[in-house]
Image: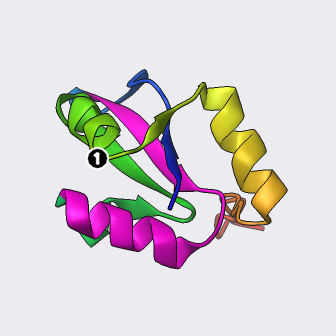
C-alpha cells in the first residue's frame, strides 16, 4: 500500500492543509485514512484534506512525501483525478 502526501501549503478555514492521495485506488486511500483516524468528511473528490498538525502522523504511518505537482501527476497517471465541476449559476437570462 502506497499513499502520498504533499506539503501543508493549502490555506483554508484558518488552517493549512496537505492532500493525501493514492495512485492505486480510492479503496486503498480510504483504508489508509481510516487507519490514520482521518474522518471520511475530509475526502474531497480524489483526495483527503489533512491539516498540517497531522502531516507528521501521515508520514510516520507510511505516506510518501511528494510535491503538490507530483500529487496531480500521480492522480492523472492512475486515472483517479476528479476535477471540480464548473459552477453553472442560475443567471437571469
Few, some or many C-alpha atoms within 10 Å of disc 1 (few <14, some 14-19, many ≥20)? some
Query: Which residue position is annotated with label 1?
Result: 61
Residue farthest to the bottom?
A: 27
Q: Residue at x 53, y 54 (%)?
A: 2
Where are the magenta residues, as a range?
A: 16-36
Residue 67: % across, % down: 60, 25
Residue 55: % across, % down: 28, 33
Res 40 → quadrant: bottom left
* Magenta region includes residue 13: no
Residue 27: % across, % down: 49, 78
Q: Quick one: SS at disc 1? A: loop
- Asked if one can make out residue 38 in the rendered structure from this viewpoint, the answer is no
Q: Residue at x 60, y 72 (%)?
A: 25
- Total marks shown come to 1
* Magenta region includes residue 21: yes
- Asked if one can make out residue 14 in the rendered structure from this viewpoint, the answer is yes
**Could you tell whether 57 is left or right of 3 in the image?**
left
Work out whether 17 lies above or below 46: above
Q: Residue at x 40, y 71 (%)?
A: 30
Amino acid at each position: 500500500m502506497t499513499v502520498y502526501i504533499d506539503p501543508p501549503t493549502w490555506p483554508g478555514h484558518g488552517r493549512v492543509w496537505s492532500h493525501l492521495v493514492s495512485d492505486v485506488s480510492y479503496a486503498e486511500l480510504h483504508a489508509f485514512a481510516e487507519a490514520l483516524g482521518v474522518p471520511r468528511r475530509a475526502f474531497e473528490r480524489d483526495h483527503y484534506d489533512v491539516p498540517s498538525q497531522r502531516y507528521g502522523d501521515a508520514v510516520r504511518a507510511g505516506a510518501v512525501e511528494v510535491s503538490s505537482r507530483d500529487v496531480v501527476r500521480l492522480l492523472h497517471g492512475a486515472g483517479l483525478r476528479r476535477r471540480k465541476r464548473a459552477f453553472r449559476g442560475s443567471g437571469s437570462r
